[in-house]
Image (cartoon, rainbow, N blue to C red):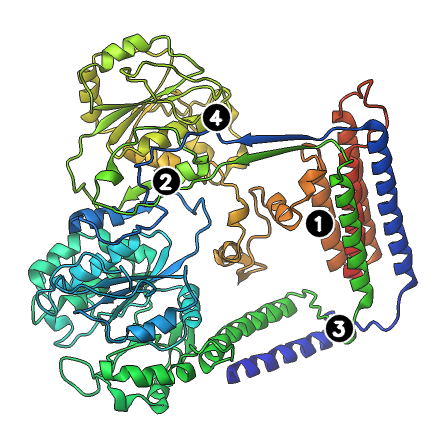
Amino acid sequence: IDNSVQRMQTISRVLQEGKENGILVRTGQYNSFRPKLLLLLGLFLAVVVTIFIISVSTIKYTELQSVVTTVTSTFVPCREDESNSLIQPPGVLMHNMSDEELLWRASFWARRKGYPFKRVPKIAFMFLTKGPLPLASLWERFLKGHKGLYSVYVHPDPSFNAKFPADSVFHKRQIPSQQVAEWGRMTMCDAEKRLLANALLDISNEWFVLVSESCIPLYNFTTIYTYLSQSKHSFIGAVDDPGPFGRGRYNEKMEPEVPITKWRKGPQWFEVDRDLAATIVKDTLYHHKFREFCRPACYSDEHYFPTMLTIEKPTALANRSVTWTDWSRGGPHPATFGRSDITEEFFGKIFDGENCSYNGRNTSMCYLFARKFAPSALEPLLHIAPKIMGTSGNGNITRTQIDIEALYSVQRMQSMVVQLEEGKENGISVRTEQYKSFRPQLLLVLGLFLAGVVTIFIVSTNKYTGLQSVVTTVTSSFVPRREEEPDGLSKWIQPHAVLMHNMSDEELLWRASFWPRRKGYPFKRVPKIAFMFLTRGPLPLASLWERFFKGHNGLYSVYIHPHPSFTSKFPADSVFYQRQIPSQLAKWGRMTMCEAERRLLANALLDISNEWFVLVSESCIHLFNFTTIYTYLSQSKHSFMDAFDDPGPFRRGRYNERMEPEVPIAKWRKGSQWFEVDRDLAATIVRDTLYHPATFGESDITENFFQKIFDGVNCTYNGRLTLLCVIFLQGSLLLVLWSRCFTFLPRFWDFRDFTPISFYFVYFFIQVWKLKHDAKASVVALVAVIVSVVATVASAQSESPAPSPTSGSGAFSPSIVSAGVAAVAALVFGSALRI
């Protein structure tokens, strides 16, 4: 808190120096009402009334009909017995998977970036226990009121059967466990990997915290969630100890995979993010080395994870634990605390005992959990929890909340000071607005503007209203069926009997991009060839292909992508029966053709046995029998796809320099449309968003979405490093944001015209008028608005159909309405910002 005060003083000094050096500093005091504002308000009301009168008169005499087109997904849902555990977590944690099957399944990773659904990240609390949970009541209070933000997993001794009431957070949260043979052996690490693997099956789990039955939280849930979610590192101790209990435990037989320079030691209790958790469960290389060559007095639980992650992901580690333990009493085990130890002074020593680094800055908030606490400590812990942990729920600001808020306040203050100092040195204008009086003028302007918009909205949606609008609603939802009783891998890995589904392309590509990080397959897998038919409609050569496939069931799969209006009708004994996938219209030479091919690949990738993928058309035939082709593809070390560098006009001559730097001309290639690729290349194709840019939907627009953009990269500005590198974003973001603010606009705005142009010019107008307070900039901005209105009206006039004899000639285009509203909105908001 003292640091925050010092930073505030620094900011004040920077502002004073800015005034002395001629940097523009504005303060506004508004004591009088401006006559020009009355004129502006009158103009606005006149425009609204005019639009109202014209709309009513147009509707009355023309009786235009509203056209609302609803396009509903016609995809047939998957069969009822299909389980999908990629999104929905298992309803029951008990299963019959072996450790090898569990680790393989948990290692699946989406190679395609992002999530095609609204994902709320959760903390997975993993309890590694011997049996009961004596401090369960304290954890119940800690987790209360935060459902949907956490998951609980318990790994006890296999002989123990937990019995918690149905309303408990521990109810049915016990996972299939195995015996931990001896403390310090690899069986302890296997139990921890088992917890991680089960928690990874819930794709919403983002942070994984390992605790024991003797651990307690030191802060309330909100504080811990914020601390972990805001951290740039995972918290696992990894110390290079040159002493007998560090490097002295190293075995030279671990080389070369585990060199002594990477040998690390750390506490058993950790917190890792999803990427590190998947890195742990996928490991087979280091696990074998530690099992063979790290035995007491080498304790694997202190060395395996720190050493492996130091080799694989060193920059992701904070090199410290967030679980406090007391080793001051000596011995092989830390101190245990009972009833008499639980005092406020005891916790004060934990909170203020040391400093550490958090996101590159010093802080005294180093530990989130503490151990070891005996069962006798439960009663005093419950009594002292409201004071220490802030779990009373009374709404009062606790000391822990002040700590974390002060930490982030200091970070914000430092960033502001850096920006102000850079601005002063570079001659950038710094403005501060000090509003010492209430601004009724601005409130009146905004109120009248909203009243005008609501008036237009009521007119346009009135039962007598018929401004012609085309609203297309496409509904496509991916609602997987919860797997209530998982019984191993059999349901999860078997191919779909019915190919029709209700996934959107984005959902399909994301799901198809899942890839196991763990090598090999924990079951007998017979690789198959996926024959993908990209057709316009019928398959005239189907009989020939039937003969080709006959007798090779289990070695091939068939997928058909026809025109969306075509429905194939094959007999039940045909290889093409029910093999049509959800399709969309594709045009030759356009990206829609590539999207159709990716759609075929994605559907084929859902069958994990498909290893080779062949794209053919309805006019293709095979030149050899099935056995020859299968042998040819399975023994090949390469995939078969043309990629020629031709300098001619139909090759490099088609290159566009705007593709750089992602697509340099030196890598520009041309080839045939028809290809054969293996599973790795197929997954590479469907995961791509760089060369096939991603678009952003409503569920993507979150605070974290923009935070990743703002903090994602450093760059140089005027010779100085800065985080302000990106000022524009591509991907239909503007209309998405606008639709989230004004969801009713599509009812009377036709987005097929140049209406978006007016938005761009309006945004330009507002920003210029706000940032450049001078007459020339105002003129430029007003010209921009006029151009936007003219462009929109001209577009509407040029694209509007000729009036029919029955509709009259007084039709008022919705484009003119949208242009008028956009112009008025710009004037009002711009004036309000300039007041």
Looking at the rendered structure, the secondary structure element under dot 2 is helix
Nearer to the camera, 577 or 379: 379
Residue drawn at the location 30% of the way across and 72% of the way down: 320
The percent coordinates of residue 687 (x first, y second) are: 39, 39
Q: Which residue is mark 2?
A: 511
Asked if disc 4 and disc 3 are in contact, CB closer than 8 Å, the reply is no
Residue 763's disc number: 1
Q: Which residue is mark 4?
A: 584
First in sequence, mark 1 or 2: give its number.
2
Residue drawn at the location 45% of the way across and 15% of the way down: 536
Q: Nearer the viewer, mark 1 or mark 4?
A: 4
Residue 435's disc number: 3
Looking at the rendered structure, the secondary structure element under dot 4 is loop
In the rendered view, tell whether residue 283 sits above or below residue 154: above
Within the image, what quadrant is residue 79 found in? top left
First in sequence, mark 4 or 3: give its number.
3
First in sequence, mark 1 or 4: give its number.
4
**Label 3: how many Cα within 10 Å (few below 14, some 14–19, many 20+):** few
